[in-house]
Each structure stands twice: as C-alpha cells, then as structure tokens.
Amino acid sequence: MTSQLHLQAEGEVATLTIDRVEKRNALSLEMWNRIPGIIAEIEKDASVRVLVIRGVDSSAFASGVDIDEFSRIAASEELGWQLMDTVHAAEQSIANCVKPVIAMIEGYCVGGGVELALACDLRFASRKSTFAVPPAKLGLVYSLSSTRRLVELIGIGKTRDLLYSARSFDASEAQEIGLVERIFDPEEIVDATLSYARTLCSRSQYSIRASKKIIAAVSRGAVVPDAEIQRLRGGSFAADDLKEGMAAFFEKRAPKFTWNQ
C-alpha cells in the first residue's frame, strides 16, 4: 500500500485516508491507479460493511490531480488518455463497489476530488469545506460519468453553472444544490460520519446492497425491473434477514442481521 493512501478497518467500518497534505491531497497517477485494487480488497473483506473516504486532516478532502504531474502529462495526448482512463477506472470502482461508500469532506474538494466524491454513495461535509469544479479554468473536459453523476445530483442548470464558471462555493451552497447530503460543524463531522456508517452496518446488508443495485439501474434509465432486480426482490423472502427483521419487530428489539455475502 502506498504511504499516501492508508486503508484501516475499525470493526465493520473501513476508512481510506488520502494523505498528501503538502499537495492538499492532490492524487498522483500512481494513487489513482491504486484505488481499484483497494476497492477490490474492501469487497473481499467480509468483515467490512461500509467504507469511508476522507483526507488525513481538516485541510483537504482531495484537490484533484497533482498539477505538477499533470503539467508534464498535458504535453502528450497519449499520456492524457492514460490519466483520464486511470481516473475513470478509479471512480468507477468506487461507484460500482457493492458496499456503501461515504465521502467525508473537510477543507478543499476540488476537480478530481469532486469526481471522487461524486462516485461515492453519500457525501458528508464540514461547514468549512470549499468546492470547485474547475476544468474550464484549465481547458479540460469533465468525463461523461462524472458529469452524469453531477447532473443527477444537482440538475442540468446548476451543472452548467459549475462547469462553465469553474467558481468556488461553500458547504452551505453544496448542500442547498444537492451536491452533499449533510453538513456538520468541523468538530462534529468525524464522529457524525462514523456514527452514521455504524448505523448502516446495523441494517440489513441484503437490503442495502440490493437497493444500491436498483438505484444504479434507475440511474441508467431502467423503468421496468429486469431479471436481476426481480431476483433481488424475491430473494429477500428467502433470506434470513427478513425473518430476523420481522421477529425483532414483534419482539420489540434491535434486529441482528446475519446476511453478509
């Protein structure tokens, strides 16, 4: 594991920490290239139910691509495609992770950092965080997948505003337009995010993972359930989680769900 990406599990919650303070957690090509393998590791670890992605301290979540490295890559179309493909593979691996992924955003969340956050299931931000989607300041073009996720979250008009202007905005506006789901005071965000992650761990993983797949199908434009969706819905009646959930409801206790495949 590169020293600039740290993966640590505490109980059923794993945390992937971006640790490059001197660059405001800008991700190098090597760091982007590591992400799919890290996600695969998370998926294989049956003890982990939720992943949190964060910066190492409150100064930054991620400020995108390393601009010094990018200045060299930008001189070559071939290297440019290599970078774009690598970033795309990283954000797709996060988006396609079978387990819930939460972005815990403190400080700067800029460019590729927003792409990283968009690929997560949920985004929680500190009130002191700052956002920007600045490709128009550099002459770049945001990817289709990231642009689609941005449109789904905040709508076409607001996406145009952010991409065309490349302006910075604060956490309050990020929540107002729907880019982040929740904002917290700086001293609360870590505990609040981890508490929420533990809540997800206590819920039916069968239900959560099926919901994630169905939401992805809706995002792709599905309006009629396909065979997999039908299987997921019907399968809940055969899984032990439903039996446990019903028993806990009638016995007025917290359920202890066991499905974890």
Image (cartoon, grey):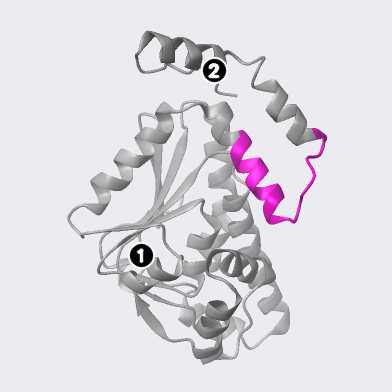
- Given the image, on which type of amino acid does mark 1 rest? Arg
- Secondary structure at badge 1 equals loop
- Dot label at residue 241: 2
The front one of 141 and 196 is: 196
Residue 39 spot, x, y in % from top left = 55, 45
The picture places residue 85, in percent across and down from the top left corner, at 68, 67
User: Whole-percent x and y of residue 119?
Assistant: 55, 58
Residue 218 part of the magenta segment: yes
Mark 1 highlights which residue?
20
Give residue 187's mark. none
Q: Is residue 196 magenta?
A: no
Q: Amino acid at mark 2?
A: Asp
Q: Is residue 169 left or right of residue 118?
A: left
Q: Magenta-highlighted stretch: main secondary structure?
A: helix
Which quarter of the picture shows residue 104? Answer: bottom left
Left or right placement of residue 243 versus residue 12 in this view: right
Q: Earlier in the sequence, mark 1 or mark 2?
A: 1
Residue 203, placed above or below residue 96: above
Would you place residue 214 above or below residue 228 in this image? below
